Amino acid sequence: MEFDEPVPTRFPDAPVKAAPAPRPENPPAPFGDLSRASIPVLCSLVKDVIPGRTYSTYEKRRRGLRLLFEHLETLPGATWQARWEASGFDGDKALPVNSLAAPGRHRDGYDLTSAAKMAFCMRVIQPTLGGFRANVFADFPDAFRQANRDPELDAYFSAVDTRSELGHSNRIRAKFDVSCALSTQGIALADLTPSALLHYSLECRRLGVTHGANKDTTRFGALGAWEILHSTGHFPPGTPTTLRKFIYNGQLTPEQMIDRYPIRHQGIRQLVIDYIVRRQADTDYNTRDGLARILTGTFWAKVEKINPGQADLNLSQDVYDQWRTEIAYWERDRTKERKNVEQILLAIRGFYLDLQSWAVEEPERWGHWVVPCPIRPQELKGFSSAGARSTSGWPTARASGSPCCPRW
C-alpha cells in the first residue's frame, strides 16, 4: 500500500539506526580529485575507467561526456558536484540525463546516459538515489567495480558469484544494490555500515525504486546484499543476519505509530492509540501499522488541516466532502488518482463501528467518542460484506466476548 507521508525510519527502537554514511575523511577518488577537472581531462580518462572496449565505444563515451559536462558548465557552482545539484538531474523527482537530447536525437540520449554512468563510476559526481535511479544504466555494477579498483568490492562480487543458491537476477541485484549505495553515499565498501545500508533500503522503498521490484513500491532494497555482507563478516557482531529479521525486531509501539503524524487534538491522538492497542488481539503488526497510517496521516491530519478546530469525530458534511476530495489524488502527485480509496474508507468506517460496538460494554471508555459514521455503506463498492473486509487485509474486529460484529 502507498501512503502520502514518507517515514524517516520504521525502526527507532532497533539497535541499528538508519542513517547515510558520514562523508569519509578521504572519499574514494580512483582517478584523483576530478571535482574541477576540465572536460578534455575527463574525456581522456575514458579508456582507463572501463578498459577493453572498441574505439567506437570510447568515442561515443567521450561524445556523451562532452554533451553532459558542457551543459553542466553553464550552471552555477564551483565544482561539477555543485553544478549537478543545480541541474534538475538530482533529488527525489530528478529528470533523466537523456532529457537533454533534442527530440529525435536518440543517439544523444544513449550517449548522455552513458556519460552519467561514467561520471558516477569515476566519482566525479555523487548523485542522490533519486538522481541515480532516474536513469537506466546497462551493467552498472561491473562498470563501477572495474572503475573503483577496490579490493573489498572485488571480494564482495566474488562472494556473490559463489552463492549458487541465488538465481542470476538475485546475484545481479545484490551487486547493483551495493554499487548504487556506494555511489549515492560517496563511500568505499569499507564504509558501508548496517546503518548506511538500512538507509539505502528505506530510501529505495520510499521512492519506489527497489531494484527488481517491478513497480511494487512496498519492497525494501538490498535484502540479498545484507545477507551476503553479514555472512562474509563485513558487518559487526550482533548485526541481525537478515534485513527482514531486523524489520520485525524493530517494530514501532502504538504511540510511535501515531506520532509519525501531527495530531493537534490530544484526545483524538490518545483515542487512536487506544484503538490500535485494542486491535492487537485480532490483527498482525503490518495491519495495525497500516491502520495507524490511515487513521492519522490519511484521515485525521487532513481533517484538522481542513477544519483546525475539529474537536470530535462528528464531521460535518462539508468537512467530509472536502476530505473526500483531498484523498482522491496522491499528495505527492496531484495528477495521480488513488486506487485504494475504498480500502481507506473501509478502515475508517471500521474504526467508527468498532467504537460503537465497544461502547456497549465499556461506555465509560468509548462512549464519549460514539457518533454517526460519515461514510455511507454505498460508498464502499466492492466491499459490501465482512468477508470482503477480511480479504482486503483488514480483519473484522470483534467486540469483547461477542461474535463478530456486523459492519454494514
Image (cartoon, rainbow, N blue to C red):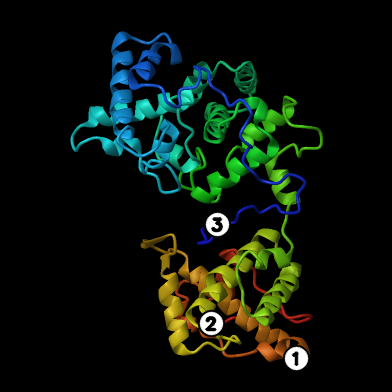
Please determine whether, in this image, residue 219 is positioned above or below residue 233.
below
State which mark lies toward you, 3 or 1: 3
Q: Amino acid at mark 1?
A: Pro
Residue for point 29% across, 33% down: 71
User: In front: 341, or 226?
Assistant: 226
- Mark 3 and mark 2 in contact (Cβ < 8 Å)? no
User: In front: 137, or 50?
Assistant: 50
Q: Look at the numbered disc 1 and give the secondary structure of its residue.
A: helix
Precedes in sequence: disc 1 or disc 2:
2
Q: CA distance from mark 2 to mark 3?
A: 23 Å
Q: CA distance from mark 1 to mark 2?
A: 27 Å
Hey, which quadrant is residue 357 in on the image?
Answer: bottom right
Q: Position of residue 29 (x, y in %)?
A: 53, 21
Precedes in sequence: disc 3 or disc 1:
3
State which mark lies toward you, 2 or 3: 2
Q: Position of residue 176 (x, y in %)?
A: 53, 30
Q: Judge from the rendering whether residue 151 lies leftward or rightward of residue 39; answer left or right.
A: right
Q: Which residue is mark 3?
A: 6
Residue for point 28% across, 21% down: 63
Q: Judge from the rendering whether residue 386 lies leftward or rightward of residue 368; answer left or right.
A: left
- Mark 1 and mark 3 in contact (Cβ < 8 Å)? no
Q: Which residue is mark 2?
A: 308
State which mark lies toward you, 1 or 2: 2
Q: Judge from the rendering whether residue 303 lies leftward or rightward of residue 252; answer left or right.
A: left
Q: Position of residue 388 (x, y in %)?
A: 55, 70
Q: Look at the numbered disc 2 and give the secondary structure of its residue.
A: loop
Please determine whether, in this image, residue 384 is positioned above or below residue 372.
above
Please determine whether, in this image, residue 374 is positioned above or below residue 22.
below
Residue for point 41% across, 22% down: 37
